[in-house]
Each structure stands twice: as structure tokens, then as C-alpha cells.
Image (cartoon, rainbow, N blue to C red):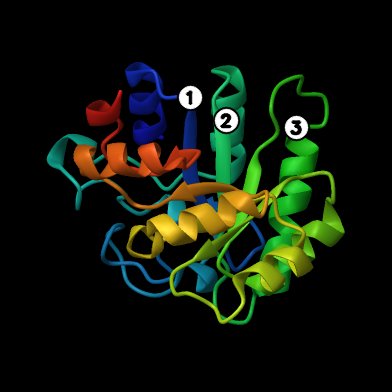
Amino acid sequence: MAALKRAVALGVEAVETDAMLTSDGVLILSHDEALGRVVRGTGKVSAMTAAELRELNAGILCAPEFSGERMALLSEAMEFCKLHAIRMNIEIKPALGQDEQTGRAVAKAVQEAYRDYPGTLPLLSSFSSASLAAAAGAAPELSRALLLETMPRDWKSLAESLRVVAVHPDAALATGQFVAEVLDAGYQMMVYTVDDHRAGQELLGLGVDAICTNRPDLFL
């Protein structure tokens, strides 16, 4: 939540975060399936309850001033972003073997949280085709984006089959040719994760719609 609050203070208009299921079916914000790198603890997020995870120190490994930070629930993040009119890109981050379950859970949670919201609905994204397909089945009105870490043999067929509106490639894949192919095919593009201002300006010059960065202060 400290990151979301900082984003608001900087004037950021949209944020990206990852949602994963706990053992008791609660959606919690976690990029890693295993604890220890970002959040102090051991074991897997999917093997613990939300209450157990909320007892862990989620900030001390980042900096001493964040030592009181807890893992945030997706519901908390959505309410915060609605309150401040911040658009959300929610990455569906399934634990091993939970692709469809997580995709459905995220889609239904967003659908319920934004049922009467007058602003822009969150964008759901994932590397998992199964998660995206499950999300589409649960809440077809929510837009989806395909994340790419490596280049599939035929990205366009994959994007068409999943009925996504955007393609989100790793910065290493975002060559001028690929950017042009994606945009010409009618998809939007966000490139991740770009923390160098000059590289970001070059990508924007190629026509990409958005950049995912850890350093919005530099770009703003």
C-alpha cells in the first residue's frame, strides 16, 4: 500500500500489481510465489492463509522505514485506487496449477468491486493463457492483455484466440518491428519494465501506449 500511496503523491494515473490466491482463497498482492525475496518469511504464498501472510513483515527487506508494511489484499488495493481515481492493471499471477482458478477469482473480484464504478475498469493481464481464458469466461466485459516474456511462434493467433485488447512485452522484445506489428494489428502495447528515461522516451517515440516502470518520478 505504501507504493500505491507514493504513486498517488507523484501524480501517477495508473498502477500495475499482481494478484495471487492464498490457501484459503483470498486474493493477495504478491509478485513472487515464494516468500523470502520481497517479504520476510519462508514457504509459498499459496500454501498459507491470508491471516498468516498478513502477520509477515512485507517492508523490512526493502528499507527500514517500511518495516511495518503488511502484504495487501487485492480488495484493499482496488478500494484505494477507486477512491483516488487511479486506473489499475491487475496481473493474474497464478501459483503452479492454479491458472484457471486464479483467473476466475480475479475476474469475479474485479467485477464485484467495480460493479457501480463510473470510471475506467481495471485491465486484467497475465502470462498464462489459461488464466486469461478463465477470466474472459467469468467476466467478459473486462478487458485483458497478454504478457510476453519470450516471443511465441505466432503471437497474433494467440492474442486473437484470447480476445485481448493489448500486448505487454518485455522491453527486450519491444523492437521497432514488433511494436509496429502489434500496433498495426490493432492492439495496444505496454512495455515492461523500463526504468531508464532515455529508453522509455525511445519506446514512446515508437508509438507504444504505456510503460511499466519502477521509476515514475523520472518519467513524470
Q: CA distance from mark 1 to mark 2?
A: 6 Å
* Vertical comparison of 47 with 174: above or below: below
The residue to which callout 3 is attached is 114
Badge 3 local density, few (<14 within 10 Å), some, or many (20+)? some
Q: Is residue 16 above or below residue 9?
A: below
The span from disc 3 to disc 2 (Cα, nearest Å) is: 12 Å
N-term mark: 1 or 3: 1
Going by the numbered disc 2, the residue's amino acid type is: Arg
* Image quadrant in which the N terminus is located: top left
Residue 58 place in picture, x, y as percent:
32, 49
Q: Quadrant of residue 59?
A: top left
Q: Which residue is mark 1?
A: 13
**Residue 133 image-quadrant placement:** bottom right
Provide residue 37's location: percent of width, then percent of height.
26, 64
Q: Amino acid at mark 3?
A: Tyr
Is residue 51 something that shows in the picture? no
Q: Quickly name the residue at label 2.
A: 87
Q: CA distance from mark 1 to mark 3?
A: 17 Å
Please report whichever mark, 1 or 2, sits nearer to the chain's N-terminal start: 1
Image location (x, y in percent) of residue 160: 75, 64
Is 147 or 101 nearer to us in this picture? 147
